[in-house]
Image (spheres, rainbow, N blue to C red):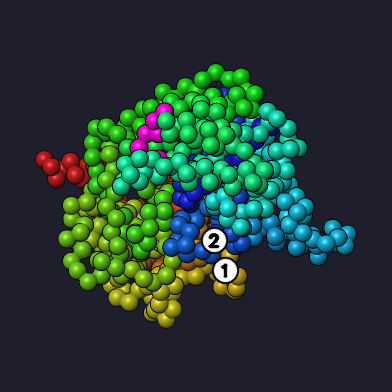
Amino acid sequence: MKYIFVTGGVVSSLGKGLTAAALGTLLENRGLTVAFQKFDPYLNVDPGTMSPYQHGEVYVLDDGAETDLDLGHYERFTNTKLSRANATTSGQVYEQVLKNERDGVYLGKTVQVIPHVTDEIQRRITHLASKSGADVLITEIGGTVGDIEGLPFLEAIREFALEAGPGNVCFIHVTYVPFIKAAGELKTKPSQQSVAKLREIGLAPHVLVARCELPLGQEVRSKLSMFCNVPFKAVIEEKDVDHTIYEVPLMLQRENMDDLVCQTLQLNLPPANMAHWQDIVRRLIAPQHRVCIGVVGKYIELQDAYKSVYESLKHAGIATDAGVQIVQIEAEDLEGDDPAKKLKDLGGILVPGGFGDRGIEGKIRAARYAREAGIPYLGLCLGMQIATIEFARNVLGLEKANSTEFAENTPHPVIHLQETQRHVKRKGGSMRLGAQECTLKPGSLARRLYGKEVVSERHRHRYEFNNAYREAFEGAGFIIGGTTSDNQLVEMIEIPSHPYFIATQSHPEFLSKPNRPHPLFVGFIKAAHERLHRRAI
């Protein structure tokens, strides 16, 4: 087993996760199997109870683990399928250490950060290495070097590297080289200080990845090499990409980063064949068609809140050779004005998941406009519930229909709390989570799109379609396109009289990849393109 540890310096949000994922792409295309691991220093047991304003998207895995959005990058860029063993927080580590102490595992010893906390971190590395059976494990350390909460993780990987021995561990440090406009030059001092802090801890990077807005140039590379104590060839330029994040693997390959990593890990492998990846990037940069999609959400100002949704739309664009322009629409902005002003020129309307009642009426107005104007509509999780409420109010005539999440005493609870959720008190990890099977109705749009009878999708919700209203909905042309195998939970709905109106209780965006786009998104983009094409004629 070979180990790669990715750390970050200077500032957060540098793209360590994206860099790790892109490196995984290159290593996979050199014939290796790759596993990923994310260490997050915060004390939350997982990000499931954290606000999108604090953390961005919560990415859900097949086994129901609520994880950091970087795990989405790992799965999108490679063939790996992750589990809760691939994500660790300080909260989980301390929780286990304290449990061990209560259970007498430490035999009365004083419990300390070193060795007990660092040993638990190392145990999680070796456990995943053994469980995955991969050739290489890439572990990203969240946060920034110098953060006090990240020190136990850095100490743990220092100790781990000593045990693993030379040729088995590669340290990659991602840093930032800012351009000072007034001086007209790139500055290396922040990176020097970051690496100095890393070396104080006892870690020395084999590869230095320099995030920058402008090309480094030989002089800057030489300075980074000299003062950060890495070979000149191991200073990797990671300039802001011009068009798409899917350019990053190709950029790193041009910088010979995968060659450097393989040399450090004593791996003799043929070069990565990235022809298929080049075609993906070509389709993103120079597509044959263009479509405009409106995403109506409540966290629109946060780029990371709907990260997987935006990426899935782009993946569908790759499959259809269409450039997808995403128009971010704040749901509350649709509540007091004519929605047609913002929605009439769109090729399609997507309503993603979310919690709480803010912006709900705006989303309902968006769903109604899509249904009545014949604009393709795709609803995800809450987006399915929104479509259900809208149809109940405006087609079935149930004027005050709602979800009990937003109106506990609504006379028509067409969406209500799942029976299994009624007595749940704990907030974290207690929703209906992870992969669940769905049986698709013969002849339905969903069945045609998926091309099979039974599918598996990831979930994260507490509320569901109320079966007491099922007969009334179906009698009005609202089709239940998919249910759980026991026919008890409604998983998908659609309106067959509409050009493309489909919604799912699941989160299909968590299973889409650039080379394997999700069929619901592909169908949506095709329908959106057809609408715009018809309007242009």
Residue at 19% across, 69% down = 337
- Quick one: which residue is furthest to the bottom in this view? 409
- Quick one: which residue is furthest to the front in this view? 183
Q: Nearer the viewer, residue 407 or 209?
A: 209
Helix, strand or loop for disc 1? loop
368 part of magenta stretch: no
Percent from the top left, x then y, of residue 305?
41, 56
In this picture, residue 68 sits left or right of residue 123? left
Percent from the top left, x then y, of residue 242?
32, 37
Percent from the top left, x then y, of residue 331?
30, 64
Quadrant assignment for the C terminus = top left
Residue carrying label 2: 48
Residue carrying label 1: 427
Label 2 Cα neighbours within 10 Å, binned few <14 / some 14-19 / many ≥20:
many
Residue at 75% across, 63% down = 98
Helix, strand or loop for disc 2? helix
Task: Kindly identify the amino acid type of the residue bearing the numbered disc 1.
Answer: Lys
Label tally: 2
Query: Disc 2 and disc 1: Cα gap in Å?
Result: 8 Å
Magenta stretch?
A: 212-218
Quadrant assignment for the N terminus = top right
Determine contact: label 2, label 1, CB under 8 Å.
yes
